[in-house]
Image: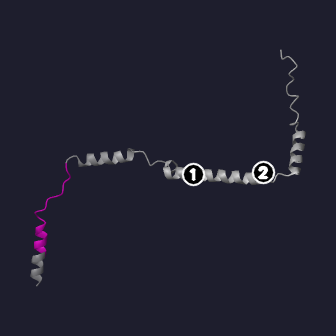
Amino acid sequence: MNTEQNKKVEEILNSLDGCAKATAPDFFYTRLRARLDKETIQPGPQSWLLRPAFAVMALVVVLVLNAFVLFQRNKTNSSFTASDTDNLQSVAAEYSLNDNSNLYDLSQDNR
């Protein structure tokens, strides 16, 4: 029984005697190196901001925010009170914003 196993093992080992060493085709490494260099030279992926889906999403967000601000402003402008008008007039008087006549004297000649 031991001899049968030895024969099988010897037969399996002898089957490898006819095999040759694997060789690469000519200029394989040159082509491989060129392919790897080509892949590393290519520019990286574009920024995520430049992708159409993100650009459209950003545009929609800006438009929604603008609409929200516009509608909120319309609501606050409709509730303008008389005290607000008085406050604005007092600020304008404080900084002389009401009096625009003294900026330029049209009767004087600027020579």
* Quarter of the image where the C terminus is located: top right
Q: Position of residue 101 (x, y in %)?
A: 88, 29
Marks 2 and 1, the one that precedes in the sequence: 1
Q: Secondary structure at mark 2?
A: helix
Quadrant in the picture for residue 102: top right
Q: Measured along the vertical axis of the image, is residue 67 above or below residue 13? A: above
Check residue 43 for magenta coloring. no
For image coordinates 86% across by 22% down, the residue present is 106
Q: Nearer the viewer, mark 2 or mark 1?
A: 2
Residue extending farthest to the front is: 78
For image coordinates 13% across by 70% down, the residue present is 13
Q: Amino acid at mark 2?
A: Asn
Check residue 22 for magenta coloring. yes
Q: Which residues are magenta?
A: 9-25
The residue wearing badge 2 is 77
Q: Secondary structure at mark 1?
A: helix
Q: How much space separates mark 2 and mark 1, taking CA atoms?
A: 28 Å
Residue extending farthest to the top is: 111
Q: Is residue 34 left or right of residue 42?
A: left
Q: Measured along the vertical axis of the image, is residue 47 above or below residue 19? A: above
Q: Position of residue 52 (x, y in %)?
A: 49, 50
Q: Position of residue 10 (x, y in %)?
A: 11, 73
The residue wearing badge 1 is 58
Q: Nearer the viewer, residue 7 or 97?
A: 97
For image coordinates 24% across by 49% down, the residue present is 28
Q: Position of residue 85 (x, y in %)?
A: 87, 47
Q: Amino acid at mark 1?
A: Ala
